[in-house]
Image: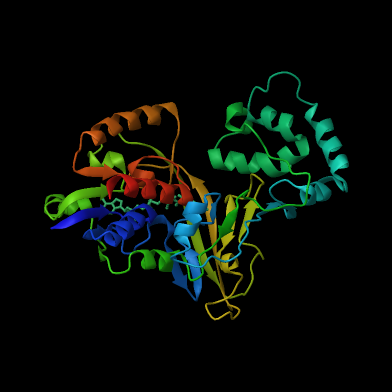
Amino acid sequence: MYDYLIVGSGLYGAVFAHEAKKVGKSVLVIDKRPNIAGNVYTEDVEGIHVHKYGAHIFHTNNTEVWNYITQFATFNRFTNSPVANYKGELFSLPFNMYTFNKMWGVVTPEEAEAKIAEQRKEITGEPKNLEEQAISLVGRDIYEKLIKGYTEKQWGRDCKELPSFIIKRLPVRLTFDNNYFNALYQGIPVGGYTKMVENMLEGIEVRLNTDYFEHKAALDALAEKVVYTGPIDAYFDFKLGTLEYRSVRFENELLDIPNFQGNAAVNYTDRETPWTRIIEHKWFEFGKDANGNDLPKTVISREYSSEWKPGDEPYYPVNDEKNGKLYAEYKKLAEAETKVIFGGRLGEYKYYDMDAVIASALDLCKKEL
Ligand SMILES: Cc1cc2nc3c(=O)[nH]c(=O)nc-3n(C[C@H](O)[C@H](O)[C@H](O)COP(=O)(O)OP(=O)(O)OC[C@H]3O[C@@H](n4cnc5c(N)ncnc54)[C@H](O)[C@@H]3O)c2cc1C
C-alpha cells in the first residue's frame, strides 16, 4: 500500500512526490502521457530542447521557490526579450525606448512621452471598445502596428468588437530595458525541463501511459490518499458540464539551417500572417548543445490561436463568470472527497505560472506532510 497515489507528473505532482518521499512516505506517480513533466516537458530534437507544450520561461520573485527549484537544476541567464515583426519591420518588446526610436525616430524619453501623449488625445471620453482603450493608453501608431493584429488573431475578433476591459494597462517603458518579465529570478534549466523533473522524481516509482480513469478502482486500492492534478471536471465525469479552455496549436519544423530568426520569440503583429508568433527553441539555451558546441540545425514552432473543443489539450483556463461558477460547483464536490486532494492548474482550474504552481504544491506539503 502506498501512502499517496499522485495522478500527474507535472510540476505540482513532482514537487509533492519529492517532498513526500523525503519525509518517508511511499508514493506512486502515474501519468497518462508517455513522458513525465506535464506541460513543461521538453523533447530532445537534434540536441535542441523543444518545449513541446508551449514555450516555458521560468521567472519568479519568490525566493523560497527559487531556492527550491534550483536544487534540481542550474538555471541559465536567459532573459525574455521578444521581438515584434510587423510586415517585415522589427520592433523591440515590451514597448521601450528601442521601440519608440524605431517607430518615430525619437531619441529621448521626453520626446517619446510627448509623442505618446499627442497620439492618445485622439480618444476623448470613455473608451467604448478595445481599440479605443488601446489608443487611449499608447496612441494609434503602437496600436496599429503592435497591438491590433496580434490581439485580433488571439481572440478571433475585431478589436472594435472586443470589450475595453480586456486591456487595463499597457506598460510603456521610457528606458532601454527590454526584459519582458519584471522578475528577480529568471532563466531556463540547463539540460532542459524534463531533466529537472527527472531529478525531482529520482527514486520514485512512475508509471507512464497510465490513465487514472481507465484503472481507477485498482489504482485507488493501492494508496491511502490520492493527489489528483488532472482536470477537475474530468474527475467527476463532466457531470455538471465541461470547463472551457483557450487553446493554442503548434506547428513544429526542423530546419537544416543554424539560425532562423535570431531570437527565441518573434511575435507577428499584423493580422494577415496566420500565426501569432514563432518560437525558435535553441535560443532558450543560446544555440549551444550540452557541451557548449553550436547546434547546426534549428527547430521552430509556429503558434496559432485556436478554438478549444472538448478532447483538445487543455491550455489556458477561461476566467470568465460562466466558467468561474461552474468551477465553484465542482470545487464543492471536490471538497466532499475525503481521500482525494485536487491540485495544480487543471485540478484547481487556475492559470498558474510555474513558480505559482510550485508555491502551491509546497503549501500543500506543509499542510499535508
Ligand atoms: C502554452 C503555455 C505556456 C506557458 N508558459 C509558461 C511560462 O513561460 N512561464 C511559466 O512560469 N509558466 C508557463 N505556463 C504555465 C505552466 O505550464 C504551469 O504552471 C505548469 O505546467 C503547471 O503544472 P501542473 O503540474 O499543475 O500541470 P501539468 O503540467 O498540466 O501536469 C498535469 C499532468 O497530469 C496528467 N494527467 C491529467 N489527467 C490525467 C489522468 N486522467 N491520468 C493520468 N495523468 C493525467 C497530464 O498528462 C499532465 O502530465 C504555460 C502554460 C501554457 C499552457
Position of residue 225 relative to residue 240, above or below, is: below
User: Which is nearer the eye, 317 or 260?
Assistant: 317
Q: Is residue 9 visible?
A: no
On the picture, is 213 further left or further right than 192? left
Position of residue 232 relative to residue 362, above or below, is: above
How many marks on residues? 0
Rendered location of residue 330, percent (x, y): 28, 33
Q: Is residue 325 visible?
A: yes
User: Which is nearer the eye, 27 or 229?
Assistant: 27
Rendered location of residue 45, percent (x, y): 47, 72
Rendered location of residue 26, percent (x, y): 21, 60
Position of residue 96 relative to residue 197, above or below, is: above
Q: Quadrant of the N terminus?
A: bottom left
Residue found farthest to the top: 125
**Colour theme:** rainbow
Taking the spot 34% from the left edge, 58% from the top edge, the residue there is: 14
Taking the spot 37% from the left edge, 67% from the top edge, the residue there is: 198
Rendered location of residue 108, percent (x, y): 88, 46
User: Which is nearer the eye, 343 or 349?
Assistant: 343
On the picture, is 202 further left or further right than 217? right
Q: Say which quarter of the image contains residue 262.
A: bottom right
Taking the spot 50% from the left edge, 65% from the top edge, the residue there is: 189
